Image: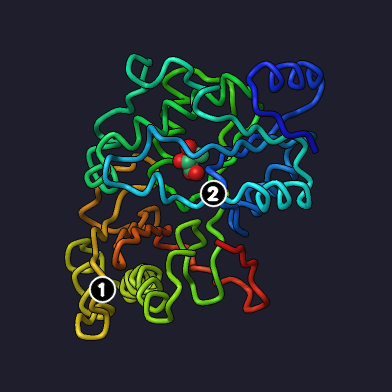
Amino acid sequence: MKVVETISDLRSIRKFWQTESVAFVPTMGALHSGHLSLINRAKSIATKVVVSIYVNPLQFGPHEDFTAYPRTKEQDLQLCEENGVDLVFYPDTQELHPEGFGAITHVIPPPHLTNQLCGLSRPGHFTGVATIVLKLFNLVTPDYAVFGEKDAQQLAIIQHMVQDLDIPVIIVPAPTAREFDGLAMSSRNRYLPSDCDRQQARLLSRLLMAVQELYRQGMETTDETLTLAKERVLDESLYPDFQLEYLAAVNDKTFQPVAILEDDSRILVAARIGNVRLIDNTLISEPIRLGAPAPQLTLAN
Ligand code: PAF
């Protein structure tokens, strides 16, 4: 496995791979089993796999966890190596933005996709994501890029960007990897050390499952269904630190809110447990698959 930190090294290796197919997995590091499932997906569709590891300052708001975001370089590189990655691009901000962020060109995704859900509490976040992802696509020039469905709004925005700007890459969605108790895998789960935090984190997938159950029983009106699901799952006296940010339903293709639930509705949830913000989502008609109870991958802080 090769690890490069500069654009010129990345480009010279990429030049050798003209006859290969390249699948790209962009990450911010702190790799966990969820990332490994993206890497495995990448390996199954291309002859070379490139992973980028870059904690992108542009996608963090001023009061978000950019500085505290976990950085676990050694373990990340080891996991990439063990999982058959061919090339890791590990740039720093000086390499990507030598002139600083002040005057760079931004990619601004369309408001109908960003003025809702995570875009409301994280203004500018998706501009930061789209800007770095387009830049990485231009550097890596992959045939495929694998994105987790866990970040469903991000995935919808990237798909839109690729279509709108005719970027020659195929976006490959990969299913959300879950812990045995339903918690969607996330680099931020490592901020949930106590049992109590962990139980509260489970509420996200439990809310999704409650909506699915009500839909199976015949409920269709979005507002009523989401309200009832919240009543069933959330008990403030049991979960004092759990703050629901949103529980919402969109059409999976248009990513616009729906008043009536249908099989192609996607249910999304975001919540804070103390300072930790978590998200999750599922297609309403697709059963949530729990992870194996086998020993889980644990990474030190
Ligand atoms: O999903 C992520 O980890 C990030 O948003 C991404 C796509 C690597 C861009 O920084």
Image position, residue 7 (x, y; %): 63, 19
Query: Regarding mark 1 in the picture, which secondary structure is present there?
Result: loop
201 over 23 or under it: above or below:
below
**Which one is in front, 83 or 114?**
83
Quadrant location, the C terminus: bottom right
The reply, left or right, for residue 294 in relation to residue 197 is right
Image position, residue 142 (x, y; %): 65, 26
Give the residue displayed 54% in from the left and 37% down from the top: 54
Image position, residue 87 (x, y; %): 73, 34
Eye-nearest disc, 1 or 2: 2
Query: Regarding mark 2 in the picture, which secondary structure is present there?
Result: loop
| Rendering quarter of residue 238 | bottom left
Q: Amino acid at mark 2?
A: Arg
* Residue that label 2 marks: 71
Judged from this view, the residue extending furthest toward the bottom is 238
Q: Name the mark on residue 241.
A: 1
Give the residue displayed 77% in from the left and 37% down from the top: 86
The reply, left or right, for residue 65 in relation to residue 56 is left
**Which one is in front, 190 or 184?**
190
Give the residue displayed 28% in from the left and 37% down from the top: 114
97 over 1 or under it: above or below:
above
- Neighbor class of circle 2 (other Cα within 10 Å; few <14, some 14-19, many 20+) is some
169 over 230 or under it: above or below:
above
The reply, left or right, for residue 186 in relation to residue 66 is right
Q: Amino acid at mark 1?
A: Asp
The reply, left or right, for residue 172 in relation to residue 188 is right
Give the residue displayed 57% in from the left and 46% down from the top: 29
Q: Is mark 2 within 8 Å of ligand 1?
A: no
